[in-house]
Amino acid sequence: ITTGARAKELNVPGEKRLKQKGVTYCAICDGPLYPGKEVAVIGGGDSALEAADFLLNLAKKIYIVNLTDSFKAHEYLQERIKKHPQVTVIHNAETKEILGEKFVKGLKYKQNGKIKTLKVQGIFVEIGRMPNSEFVKGFLERDVHDHILINCQTETSVPGIFAAGDCSSVHEYQYVIAAGQACTALLKCARYLARKH
């Protein structure tokens, strides 16, 4: 099973309409489209701060819009981002709407009971990922985040079923890790079948 994962969405007005028109879920994929632009990164974990770090060499200005009062990212990322003059951190801010007709023009957020607006041309939603594992519910064991539980041999809780990549319990969202893990799963699967004959 290599069904991957999908980005979590904000589910706010304007998001669906402006997908790929300024709203994106991958800074590494789409960041190069925003050179010299003002952008917002939504989130406060590792993925959000990694996105902001990547955008430092591209964007003119980066706003980090974080729902809570502090970051949940690694300390080294926090130190690197907080001190950078291109970055403005906005804590306790709930994104309410994405603005724009054909392309993103800004976002509305709520902070301390007040609605405020940011003028940005790009919005990077980095609030986590959801594994595509709903179809195995009640059949295979999953972790608290709904990833399919596997061991280091890529075996699931049911003999003969193997899983790999972003849908699995490894929690490392990198192409090279997913590809290597999938190769391992394929080899283990072939050996499993060979033993059955």
Image (tube, rainbow, N blue to C red):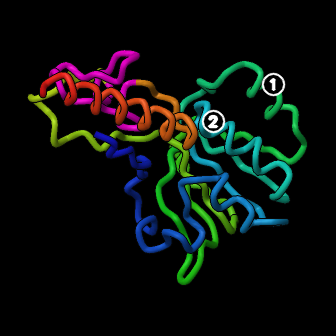
Image quarter of the N terminus: top left
Q: Is residue 146 left or right of residue 140?
A: right
Relative depth, front residue between 113 and 41: 41
In the image, farthest residue toward the right:
85
> 15 above or below 172?
below
Could you say where residue 94 lies in the image, as x and y percent from the top left?
A: 50, 45
The secondary structure type at the circle numbered 2 is: loop
Identify the residue at horizontal 57%, vertical 35% (top origin): 92
Specify the label residue 124 is tagged with: none
Could you say where residue 62 lies in the image, as x and y percent from the top left?
A: 76, 51
Could you say where residue 46 lies in the image, as x and y percent from the top left?
A: 61, 31
Q: Is residue 117 left or right of residue 142?
A: right
Where residue 83 sits, quadrant-wise, is top right
* Residue 146 visible somewhere in the drawing: no
**Quick check: is 159 in the magenta stretch?**
yes
Q: Find the magenta span and give its range.
A: 145-169
Could you say where residue 150 lies in the image, as x and y percent from the top left?
A: 32, 21
Q: Which residue is mark 1?
A: 79
* Residue 66 visible somewhere in the drawing: yes
Closer to viewer: mark 2 or mark 1: 1
Relative depth, front residue between 2 and 130: 2
Identify the residue at horizontal 53%, vertical 82% (top origin): 101
The secondary structure type at the circle numbered 1 is: helix
Q: Is residue 165 left or right of residue 196?
A: right
Give the overall secondary structure of the magenta segment: loop
**Quick check: is 148 in the magenta stretch?**
yes
> 173 above or below 156?
below
Specify the label residue 91 is tagged with: 2
